[in-house]
Each structure stands twice: as structure tokens, then as C-alpha cells.
Amino acid sequence: MIKTIFPINVLVKDYDLPEDVTNELAIAMPAIFQSIMLEHDIDADEASSNEFPVFTDKNLKEFPALLKLREIFTDGFFELANSFEDNTLTRELISELTKFNIGKLPIMKKGDYQRLHGHVNAVAFAIFYLTDVNNKRDGGELILKDPSFNTNYGFKPPEDYAVETKKNRLVVVPGYIWHEVTQYTGDDDRITIVMNLCLDNLDL
């Protein structure tokens, strides 16, 4: 008897947000990105590749829509965690973890890409898209890799799963899943926000 073991669950969820919330978030992310570059005296590449506070009191006051975004991340992390049979993460714990405000703002410009990588220190990572992208025409597509992508040929399922870049789409993935983003060739910035769920943020 053939048994399928060690399943991988990934959350892909689209939100129907009010237009004013979406517009505010689209303004907030580049503004926070610019303030991070100025405050830390770094360029866009360094600002995109490192984690910085996002849901700070200052940012929440200036952009109240960030409260909704933090709620979306909290709910998404819990929904994925709860899809596993032996989950022990409560929504309350995840809510506390997301208050630690650390995230990435990988704003992709024409020619940018993300090489194959994983989030080894995270239990899970989440991506929220703030712009639509025609991935077939402009690239910038998230590609998730089966963890066995580097094993012997013939004894594994298809190794790629592509996620379309769609405005107001949340993607939550276990942290050990390797992934990449294909080269983006569009003229308008591809704006996302990425958050890691790290248990070492709390004294457990």
C-alpha cells in the first residue's frame, strides 16, 4: 500500500478590502520604506533584504490601516497553524508575536528578483501583496519549492508551485519551504510586505 506522508499546508487567501484601506496601505509601505532608508542611511537593496519595525506606534498612528494588516497576518498565521493536526499555537500567542513589529518591505523594481532561499529562523512566513502583477508578462512570480527539490530524480512529486501576484492576497508558508521570486520586468513597483513568525520573540 502506498501512503502519502508529511503533507505540506500552505495558505493562499484573497481579501476583499475597502478601497480606502488598500490605497492607504499602498501609500504606507513606500513611505515606511523611505523612512527606513533615511533613518539607517542605507540604500534600497539593503532596506529590502533586512527586517525592520513595521507596526510601530508611530506608523500605526500615521497609517491606521496597518492595524487591519496586522490582524490579517495574525489570522493567516493561525489559520495555517490550525490546519495541522498537532498544532499547539493559539491565536492569542500568535497575536502577541505579531506585535513585535518585525517585517520586510521587499519593493521590487524593474530587473529585481529574489534568489532561492528559506526563512530558517521562522516557524512560518507570510506575504501580503499590495499590487497586481501580470506574472506571465512581467515576471515577479513567487515560486515555492518542494523540500525534496534536490533529491534523486524520479522519487519526488513536481517541485514547483507558483503563486500569482494578486492585490490583497495573503500567502502563509512554513518557514522551511524554499522559495524564489522570478525576475520582475514591470514598469510599476511590485509592493509587498513580508512577516516572519518567530517563536524566539517571546520568553516561552
Image (cartoon, helix red, strand yellow):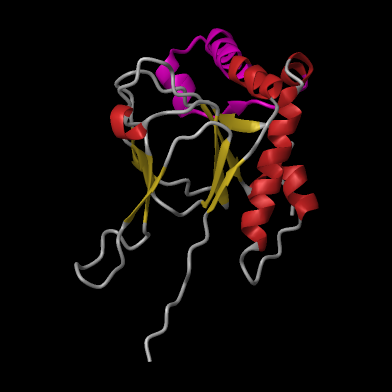
**Residue drawn at (41%, 16%), measured in percent from left and top?**
188
130 vs 94: above or below: above
Q: Is residue 57 something that shows in the picture? A: yes
Residue 144 shown in magenta: no
Q: Quadrant of residue 3?
A: bottom left
Instruction: Count how many numbered circles sit on residues in the image.
Output: 0
Looking at the image, the residue that sits furthest to the left is 153
Q: From which residue to which does the magenta span run? A: 28-57
Q: Nearer the viewer, residue 194 or 11?
A: 11
**Residue drawn at (37%, 30%), measured in percent from left and top?**
134
Residue 83 on image: x %, y %: 63, 63
169 to the left or right of 48: right
6 vs 137: above or below: below
Characterize the magenta stretch by its predominant secondary structure: helix
Q: Is residue 183 something that shows in the picture? A: no
70 to the left or right of 192: right
Residue 129 on image: x %, y %: 53, 32
**Residue drawn at (69%, 40%), measured in percent from left and top?**
72
Residue 186 on image: x %, y %: 34, 20
Residue 151 on image: x %, y %: 25, 65
Q: Quadrant of the N terminus?
A: bottom left
82 vs 47: above or below: below
Q: Nearer the viewer, residue 78 or 137?
A: 137
Looking at the image, the residue that sits furthest to the bottom is 1
155 to the left or right of 58: left
Q: Quadrant of the C terminus?
A: bottom right
